[in-house]
């Protein structure tokens, strides 16, 4: 519970200083160097305070009940996070493959300290959150996922409430939520559980948990990379789980799931924060250069800026279109300034796509070869991006290298 964090900070004597530094940091989000300095100081204070004795005893008692040295995932859940207005998707830290009491205590402190990373402070400022943050931490037994992914109980790109949209990949779900691969995307009818649409993605690698408890990367050959991840039976089981979660909470849900040894597991769920259905109809668009999935509907035009890593974000000028191999929450400062975002990998349910929808920044994911087809620094208004709500997936190089229209 978040009270454990608050008690630990109070007992550690750092709560007042943390609050003051947090207020200053919210006002410094446009100063990269100063924000980084303040965040470093706040994280150091959290580490200094550590876990109070009472909280430590309760935590370790519950951990021991799972069995000796059980391997767990330690997940953050900040106050204000995963609410109906803001998801904080992927912003705060989650630590996986944690085994042993000392490692568990360290992981909890790591999650608490992640409240004060530059990307989280920037996100809080962009959403107008000014109250002192706090964090609950969830400890879950790890499972060795064979397939995993995300299910939205409302289509995030169209707002269609009669569909469940499922994105899936082989191995652990990190590759889906982080946008590291282009997952399969399936659409399931809520009433009949019939599969009404299938888009096969491209997964060059998967992440598995090794015998030593650590994750490792497995490269996939072409046939495996382009193989369908889920059959219709698995899709129905996931859809049933997602629908049950929605019924329990009473609102559309973003559900992370995993399959291991034939069992479907609920990993976590949060309300869907964006159900905006306003989007251009795409009529009259010509000279299509690349296509992808509509992660955040909208339209924009501007200069192309191709970036390879978040550290290059200072090269992006306001209202340019960010084109990158992939994005994650570390890209938030750049996404805030972008007119639109185009990525080569990722799906509609990855963390960066969720944040783009919340910030109302048009976003297209899974546009293969975008960083090579779209040339860096084209003149202003050289690139236009439109995301109509209902289209078909394709990759199509158009006539003009100076214009781009994006469709799913």
Image: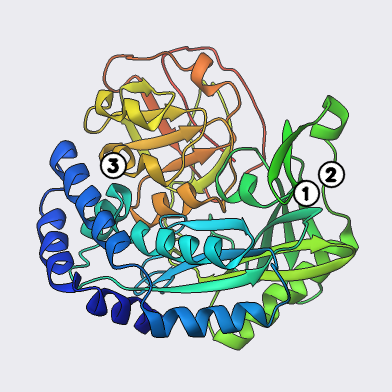
Residue at image location 42% in from the left, 33% down from the top: 385
Residues at circles 3 and 1 in contact by the CB criterion of under 8 Å: no
The location of residue 328, given as percent across then percent down, is 46, 43
Evaluate whether residue 108 shows in this view.
yes
Q: Nearer the viewer, residue 247 or 263?
A: 263
Q: Residue at x 50, y 85 (%)?
A: 58
Tell which of 1 and 224 is nearer to you.
Answer: 1
| Precedes in sequence: disc 1 or disc 2 | 1
From the image, which quarter does the C terminus lie in? top right
Please report contact status of discs 1 and 2: CB closer than 8 Å, yes or no.
yes
Tell me: 216 left or right of 224: left
Mark 1 is surrounded, within 10 Å at the Cα level, by few (under 14), some (14 to 19) or many (20 or more) other residues, namely some
Q: Position of residue 127 (x, y in %)?
A: 25, 61
Q: Nearer the viewer, residue 110 or 35?
A: 110
Q: Is residue 138 left or right of residue 114?
A: right
| Sequence-first tag of 3 and 2 | 2
Q: CA distance from mark 3 to mark 1?
A: 34 Å
Q: Is residue 175 above or below residue 116?
A: above
Location of residue 109 with respect to 2 vertically, above or below: above
Residue depicted at x 84% and y 26%: 221
Residue occupying the point 56% across, 30% down: 344
Q: Which mark is residue 228?
A: 2
* Residue 133 spot, x, y in % from top left: 27, 70
Residue 203 shows in this picture: no
**Residue 296 at x, y percent in the picture:** 46, 49
- SS category of the residue bearing label 3: helix
In space, the residues marked 3 and 2 are separated at their CA atoms by 35 Å
Q: Quadrant of residue 189?
A: bottom right
Q: Which mark is residue 333?
A: 3
Question: Which mark, residue 198?
Answer: 1
């Amino acid at each position: 519970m978040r009270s454990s964090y608050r008690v630990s900070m109070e007992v550690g004597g750092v709560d007042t200083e943390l609050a003051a530094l947090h207020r200053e940091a919210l006002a410094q989000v446009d100063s990269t160097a100063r924000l980084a300095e303040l965040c470093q100081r706040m994280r150091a204070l959290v580490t200094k305070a550590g876990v109070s004795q009472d909280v430590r005893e309760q935590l370790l008692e519950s951990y021991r009940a799972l069995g000796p040295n059980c391997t767990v995932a330690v997940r953050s859940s900040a106050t204000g996070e995963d609410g109906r207005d803001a998801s904080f998707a992927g912003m705060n830290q989650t630590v996986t493959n944690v085994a042993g009491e000392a490692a568990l205590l360290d992981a909890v402190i790591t999650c608490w300290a992640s409240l004060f990373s530059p990307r989280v402070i920037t996100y809080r400022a962009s959403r107008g959150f000014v109250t002192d943050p706090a964090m609950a931490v969830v400890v879950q037994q790890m499972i060795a996922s064979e397939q995993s992914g995300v299910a939205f109980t409302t289509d995030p790109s169209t707002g269609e409430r009669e569909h469940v949209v499922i994105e899936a990949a082989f191995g652990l779900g990190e590759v889906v939520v982080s946008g590291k691969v282009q997952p399969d995307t399936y659409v399931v009818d809520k009433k009949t559980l019939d599969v009404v649409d299938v888009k096969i993605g491209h997964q060059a690698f998967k992440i598995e948990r090794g015998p030593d408890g650590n994750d490792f990367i497995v490269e996939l050959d072409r046939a495996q990379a382009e193989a369908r991840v889920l059959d219709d039976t698995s899709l129905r089981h996931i859809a049933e789980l997602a629908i049950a979660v929605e019924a329990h909470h009473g609102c559309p849900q973003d559900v992370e799931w995993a399959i291991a040894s034939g069992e479907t597991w609920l990993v976590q769920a949060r309300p869907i924060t964006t159900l905006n259905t306003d989007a251009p109809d795409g009529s009259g668009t010509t000279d299509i250069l690349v296509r992808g999935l509509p992660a955040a509907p909208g339209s924009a035009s501007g200069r192309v800026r191709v970036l390879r890593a978040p550290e290059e974000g200072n090269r992006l000028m306001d209202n340019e279109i960010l084109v990158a191999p992939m994005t994650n929450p570390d890209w938030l400062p750049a996404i805030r300034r972008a007119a639109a975002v185009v990525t080569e990998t990722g799906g509609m349910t990855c963390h960066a796509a969720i944040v783009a929808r919340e910030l109302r920044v048009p976003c297209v994911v899974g546009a293969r070869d975008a960083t090579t087809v779209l040339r860096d620094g084209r003149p202003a208004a050289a690139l236009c991006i439109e995301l109509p709500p209902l289209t078909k997936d394709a990759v199509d190089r158009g006539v003009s290298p100076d214009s781009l229209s994006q469709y799913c």
